[in-house]
Amino acid sequence: LSYCIGLDSQVFDMEKLPQKLHLIEQHLRSDRCVGIKLYPGYASFYLYDDRLAPVYELAARYDKPVAVHTGLTATDNALLKYSHPLVMDEAATKFRKVRFVMCHFGEPWFTDAAAVIEKNPNVAADLSGLLERKIQDFGAFCEKKHFYIERLKGWLEYLDLYDRFMFGTDWPLANLGDYIAFTKEIIPEEHWDEVFYKNAMRIYHLKLEAMLDS
């Protein structure tokens, strides 16, 4: 199956990064590796740090996106100043040849996330990590979270860039059925094919048809 090579807080050390570049490149050479995943909030670094330039050069050379955890973190010892979506603006401007994926659409900073995506054509986003656990009554959930859902939908409508958004769940933290229903709630039906399938196929260069045929 396809995967992104993750440089997470347990193994990521900016000072030792040069020693790991050959391992990163080894993964990127594989068709199964479709991108790089960074966790700046957990590992305490800024995306635009020049020390990341060699990583971004590899991503551009192999034409594979750099997915980034943005927005709230799962632990209270992580630092939000590193995971705020506005940080991606400087990285996307500085490293124009890199295709960035803003994971979780910067939740809950949708306004700032939308501004970054609107300004930078090399930034896409996924809609993962917006739900947790099984939802027992989806209608009641939507009513209770009306403020949150309407503002999320509003910024998606404002951008009108549905070719740059992808379905995602953060499974197993969220129920797949609930997340499909939630995504249909915030994405107009005429864009479901793009968001649920086509955009990820294009952005990550997935070869699902070949897998299905085999």
Image: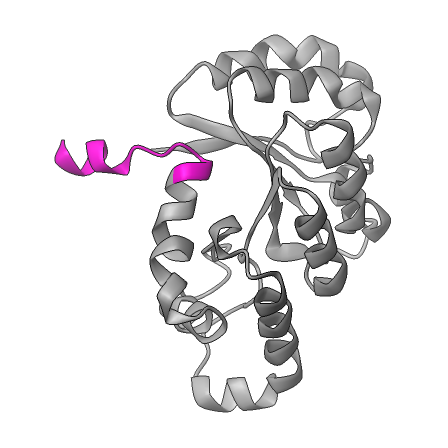
Residue 137 is at least partly visible in this image = no
Q: Nearer the viewer, residue 89 or 211?
A: 89
Residue 48 is at least partly visible in this image = yes
Residue 29 vertical position relative to residue 139 in the rendered view, above or below: above
Taking the spot 50% from the left edge, 91% from the top edge, the residue there is 140
Q: Nearer the viewer, residue 82 or 166?
A: 166
Quarter of the rendering containing residue 177: bottom left
Question: Is 119 on the left or on the right of 207, as rendered?
Answer: right
Residue furthest left as drawn: 213
Provide the residue span drawn in magenta.
Answer: 202-214
Secondary structure, magenta segment, majority class: helix
Question: Is 57 on the left or on the right of 62, as rendered?
Answer: right
Taking the spot 65% from the left edge, 41% from the top edge, the residue there is 68
Q: Quadrant of the N terminus?
A: top left
Q: Nearer the viewer, residue 78 or 205?
A: 205
Taking the spot 64% from the left edge, 12% from the top edge, the residue there is 21
Residue 212 located within the stretch drawn in magenta: yes
Q: Number of marks in the image?
A: 0
Instruction: Point out residue 56 in the picture as x, y percentages from the top left corner.
Output: 66, 22
Taking the spot 82% from the left edge, 52% from the top edge, the residue there is 80
Question: Is 47 on the left or on the right of 26, as rendered?
Answer: right
Residue 71 vertical position relative to residue 157 in the rendered view, above or below: above
Instruction: Point out residue 76 in the picture as x, y percentages from the top left corner.
Output: 79, 57
Q: Quadrant of the C terminus?
A: top left
